Each structure stands twice: as structure tokens, then as C-alpha cells.
Image (cartoon, rainbow, N blue to C red):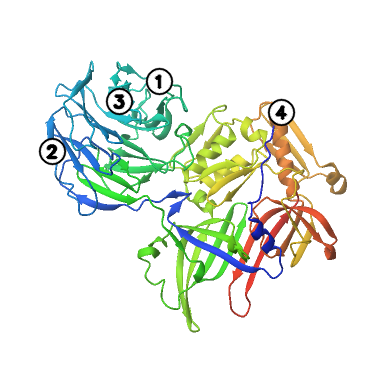
Amino acid sequence: MSYSGVAMRTLYSALLAAQKKASGVPYVKVEVVDSIGGVKRLDWQRLYTGSEPDFYHAATMPADGSLVRCRVDGGNLYRQRVANPGPASNFGAWTLVETCANAGVALASYGAAVLLFYVGTNGRTLYLRESTDYGASFGSPITITTAASAVGWLAAALKSDGTALFIYSVGGAVYRVKRSGGSWGSPAAWSNSLSSVSGLACQYWLDFNVLVTGADSQSRNKVWSTIYGDGYSEAVDAWSPLRELMDASAGSSVEFRAPFLTYADTFRATFIEKYSGSESYNRPYFSYSPAAADFVDNLWREPVPLNLSGQYGLALTCSASAFWLTAPWGVWQASLATSTLDVTADVLELTSEDEPGGGRLRVVLRNDDGCYLDLSGAKAVIQRGAEVRISPGYVTASGPLASAGPAYWLQGWEYTSGSGGATLVLQARDAWQLLDGWRARRQYAWAKGERNVFQLLSFVVARAGLELSALSYSSTITNLYPSFTIQPGESAATAVHRLLSMAPDVLFFRGHLAYVRNPQAADASDYAFGVEHPVLSGRYATLRPPANRAQVFGNGPFVEGFDWAEIEDAYDRVRQIHDLNLDTVALAQDRAGAEQRHLAMAAQDGSLVAPPNCGQELYDVVTITDPPAGLSVAKRRVLGLSLRYVRSGRAPAYEQRLTLGAV
């Protein structure tokens, strides 16, 4: 069954009234933001460069904002606490705790409590030292358990009520010990299976969320996510299956190790990619999940390399205002606050064009006083890849009002001079450019029945740093679980188009969010032009659809769909679809219906120019009353949008062009 949602952005009543006036005063808000897909882009500043050896380490930030670190060096355990970490802090002073094994360490904190876990000199006994004063001092060691064999990696997380999860690896097995009600339980092995483990990370957020690096039974090195349940996405004290985040083929000389995980605005992770072939390296990578994604969704942006080297990873932790990235030999800081530059007052001209599969933006800013020659300070946000947000609006009786509209990402800029003036011209592309910029580093393949079309779309757009939701959706997009492969070098945009071809649904962007919508012939109108909202000019065409007969060849079923009226007028023109995923008549019929919907929308053409409707979006349905063209409450679907704004000069303008198709 299809779900029907609300289309077109909701507008303030004062803005809705203002845009229907022929004499409306234009207002367009333009902002530049240091985010991608709604997630803060971290600008790391290195605060410390030391000579400590690269080895097992950990970091955490208790509630007072202090930075607590620990490291292992030559059989000794060291700790450090910097009360007010910043550029002037001393990150080179360490306190010897005691001797230990050359194995993993872990830190976890909540409030004033800090837990420090390490391995004793025998390589098997696991100890805890606890602090109740933000890591300023630690109590005597407590024995948690003694493993049967040598322990490798450790990780831990702490809840607000004092419940703690401590995990450690022995060979290819991971064990957990849980503290509840102040008492530590007995160790228990997880329910998953690996041949080796090369790193563990744990972060509590609704569940105990875990990253694991290692090799599976086929010697394929991977990064996985898994959950130790606390009742949100997984049952209490149950392990979820391993879900793949990164993969390296057996024999590729690539392995992954030393993951770290934290949560603030979203889940963020680091890990090491180690290549032991010619031109070997140990390179850190970072990734993050879309802002609203749950950990169980396992949606991650394609990991990005850092210009650093090390085998034992980069620990991630955060305060309320900043992220911290640490290794024994280095400390980096990045602000958590999103920087926004409002350039509205300087906009001279703006042109945006949005259509299925891509959109572009051009913004001309006044620069006659040279105010944009120095892109530093507050203007440092103007950089390649920054997000540009366009909000069309009008000046109302309540003041300037705008509707948060499209988002674009800066491709570059240029300075112009002449005729007594100077400008800065920003060039940007919409989220389709982010999808086109992602290329598969390897082959991705899903077996039939593994994920439905919507889940596959979610994976692909997340890999480009975007998030997917739905205004409405067809039964096909949730019920079809196809066999699907993304080949090396294929773009996310191409993969998205191939997935959308399987269903009647379309995809568009509201700001940085991707939305699926199921356009249907019976959709109600979202807005009316021509009565209260003036039409400046119009062109309305009736066309032959690209085809009028769809033949679907599935894995057994064969189904046809016909536009009989068009066939009677112009004879048949066939479009054939071959898809072995379609193994039932119902699925084949759905595909035929989807193809006919796409063809039907192309059966009309035209355009309309009007004062901007600030809430207008792609695929909205509008009604048009234009008596000179013979139209009275005629329904059309919006298949393209452009906005033109010229603030001053001999020909000021504020108009919107809608490209029209059939409903």
C-alpha cells in the first residue's frame, strides 16, 4: 500500500499573502554554512606535536570539559589530565600509573566518573581504576577478570546510571563484562564469529554501539558495526549481527585496525587502513553517519583519509563545544559550532536552476569596497565544498520572511571588476553533484532478498554524506528486494537512477535532505496559479509520450502495460524492461505501472513564469488558470524550477520559472 505525504514547504500566512501580491517586495536570504548534508564539517587545528611512540592509547572527556588520556609505552601505563584543554595547554606531561602488558587500554566517562581499563603484566588479567573527580585522581586497581589467553584490544562505555560495558578481544573472539547496580558480572563471549580482531570501539547512545576491525573466516579484512543491546535497537544483553562498513578482499594486502567511536551531533568514527604491499602505509580514515540515522542503520559517509600516519589509530572524544582527536604524539581540536555567514545584504544577482538529476546556482555579491578580498575570519566559511542555503521570500507587514529552500555546495568563485564596480561570483551545484562525486572504490553487491530498494537508496546517498527520507512512497520501493550491484568507478548518481528505474518513485532534495516521493495521477494540487497568484507568462504543450506500451520480462513472468488511447491515435511504440529480480506477476505488474507513470508525466510540456512561490518544490502538483491559453484550474506537475533575482540596476527582477509536465 502506498503512503501519501504532504508536498510543498509550508509557508507563514504573512509570506503566503505577500507572494500573491503583484507588487510584492522581494527578499532572498543567502547563507554560507560549513556543513555537508547537514553535518558539521570539522576543521581540525593541531595543538600538540610530541615524540611519544605510536602505541595503544585512549581518550575521554568527562563532564567538566577536561581531556583525560592514557597510553602504553614499553610495558608502562601512563595517564594525563588537562583541566582546560586549549592551544596553550601542556599535552606532553604524563603520569606513570604502573607496569602493564603491551596491549590495549580503554577509557570511558560520564559526569564526574572516569573508568580506566588495562591489562596486567601477565597479558591476561584485566584491571579497572576508577575516578570520581573527573580523572584528577584514580582509585586502586580492581580485578575485572582473567582471560584464558592473551588479551588484545579493549573498549568501554558508561551510562548515566553507572551501568558500564567493558569489551575485550582474545584472538578472534570478543568478550563482554557488564556492571549493573555497582557490581561486575561474569565475562561472556559474543554471538558473532571472526578469525581475528584488530581493534574495538564502544560508545553508549541508547544502546552500546560497537565498531570492530579484523578478519572473517574467509580472511577478508573489514570494519563492522554491531550493537550490544540496551533495549533500543537490540534486546537487552543481546548482540546484533555484524554489519559491514568497510571491506578489503583477501590477498589485497589491506587490513583495518584501531577504530574509535564517539557521538555528539551524529556518530563519528576513525580507523586505520594498513597496506603492506609496495608503497606501504598506515593511514587514518574518518567517517560519520547522517545526522538522524540510528546506529543500527549502519549508514556511513564514504571514509575520508587524513594526512597522517600511525598504526594505533586516532582517539575521538568531544565536549559540548568541541571535538578532540588524539594520539600519544598529537592532539587536534575542532569546533562543534556550525559557522554561518549571512551574505543577504550583499547579493546583487542570483540565479538558480533545479531539475531532476541536477541543479546549479550562481550568486553575485557586491565587492566594490573589497570586503570579500580577504576570506578569513567570519568569511573563512567561504571555501570549496561549503553549503550555500537559498531561502526565497518577501518583505511582509511582519518584516522580511523567507522559506528555507534549496541547498547547494560551492564549486568555486571568481572576482570581477570593471565599469566602476567589483563583485564576487559564487558558483555552486546541488546535492546531485555530491552523488555524482562519489565513486565506488570497489564492487558492492547485495543478494536478492537482502535489502529493499529504499534501503539500497539510503546506503548509496549516505555514502555521499546525505540522508534519505520519504514524503510518500510506493509499495514497490519497500517490497522489492532486488539483486543489485554497484561496479567499481560507478557514481552514486548513476546507482540512484538505476534504483529509481525499478519503481514509480522520484527523488528530490529539500535543503540537504533527500526525499522519495511517489507521484500519482490522482495527487491533489499543492498550489494554484492564475487567480490569486498572478501568471506573468505561460507556454503549455501536449506531447506524445516517449512510448505507449511497456513490456516487462521478469524471471518467469511477462507483463504488458498499454496506453490504449495513445496507441489508437499513433500506433504502438514499445519500451522493454528486462529484470530477473521480477520473479512474481505482482512485481512485474508494479514495474510496468512504474514505467507507465514515468511515461505519462512526459506526455505534457510547457513552462510558467510567475512571482516566486517560496514553497515550490520539484514534483509538486499545481493548478493553472490562464484564460488566454484556454486553461482553467488545469493540473500540471512541476518538473523543473528556476529562480531569478536581480536586486537593482536598469532591469530589476524577481521571478520563478516552472517547467511543467503531466500529473
Q: Disc 3 marks which residue?
A: 166
Q: Earlier in the sequence, mark 2 or mark 4?
A: 2
Q: How many marks?
A: 4
Question: At 58% from the left edge and 57% from the top edge, which residue is drawn?
Answer: 359
Can see residue 74? Answer: no
* Circle nearer the N terminus (2, 1): 2
Label 1: few (<14), some (14–19) or many (≥20) C-alpha neighbours in 10 Å: some
Q: CA distance from mark 3 to mark 2?
A: 24 Å
**Who's the residue at 74% across and 68% down the image?**
536
Looking at the image, tell me whether mark 1 or mark 3 is earlier in sequence order: 3
Near mark 3 (Cα within 10 A), the count class, few <14, some 14-19 or many ≥20, is many
Residue of label 1: 237
Residue receiving disc 2: 95
SS class of the residue under badge 3?
strand
Residue type, label 4 = Ala
Q: Tell which residue pokes out farthest to the front in this image.
A: 398
Mark 4 or mark 1: name the one nearer the start of the chain.
Answer: 1
For the N terminus, the image quarter is top right
Q: For mark 4, what is the residue?
A: 586
Q: Position of residue 109 (x, y in %)?
A: 29, 34
Q: Nearer the viewer, residue 51 or 570?
A: 51
The kind of secondary structure element at disc 2 is strand
Please identify the residue farthest to the right as the structure is shown: 568
